Image (tube, helix red, strand yellow):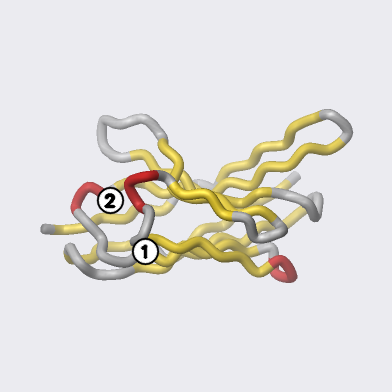
Amino acid sequence: QVQLVESGGGLVQAGGSLRLSCAASGSIFPINTMGWYRQGPGKQRELVATITTLLSTNYGDSVKGRFAISRDNAKNTVYLQMNSLKPEDTAVYYCNINYRLSSREYDYWGQGTQVTVSS
């Protein structure tokens, strides 16, 4: 089993910054993709950013140029630096780890951390 523990959410004014962290523990296959997704009020969960073990990144269109994802493979930890925050970034942010092993896909989620951006 894999556990994901997120931290760093909170309340910030528009234009401000926050940094989220997510530490994974348990039986983790070393080749994996970690990432962040978010779900705003009344919205579906959407991609924020993902990063592979080899540090290949992918971003949702709404955060490109403002957010940066990084990871520390030795610590199984992923980070999300969020700059120039907007009220529409308000959401619960979920950490995810995904990998494939022996033709089976493994997908784990954190409990979520609230990010609120005031105007």
Q: Is residue 38 left or right of residue 49?
A: left
Q: Look at label 1 and name its amino acid.
A: Met
Q: Residue furthest right?
A: 102
| Quadrant of the snapshot with the N terminus | top right
Q: Residues within 10 Å of mark 2 (few under 14, many from 20)?
A: many
Question: Which amino acid type is shown beneath numbered disc 2?
Answer: Asp
The residue positioned 36% from the left and 60% from the top of the image is 65
Q: Is residue 27 visible?
A: no
User: Residue at left 63%, top 64%?
Assistant: 77
Image coordinates for residue 31, horizontal then vertical, percent: 78, 51
Quarter of the view holding residue 81: bottom left
Which mark, residue 35? none
Residue closest to the eye, 68 or 4: 68
Q: CA distance from mark 2 to mark 1?
A: 10 Å
Quarter of the image where the C terminus is located: bottom left
Q: How many marks can you see?
A: 2
On the image, numbered disc 2 is attached to which residue? 89
Which one is in front, 117 or 26?
117
In the picture, residue 107 is in which quadrant?
Answer: top right
Q: Which badge, 2 or 1, is on the more N-terminal residue?
A: 1
Q: Write the residue at 69% across / 63% down.
A: 76
Look at the picture and state if 114 lies above or below 19. above
Residue that mark 1 sits on: 82
Pointer 1 local density, CA inside 10 Å: few below 14, some 14–19, many at least 20? many
- Image: 112 above or below 42: below
Residue drawn at point x = 88 percent, y = 33 percent: 102
Question: Does the image show residue 78?
Answer: yes
Do residues under tags 2 and 1 come within 8 Å of each other at their CB atoms? Answer: yes
Query: Which sits in the foreground, 11 or 89?
Result: 89
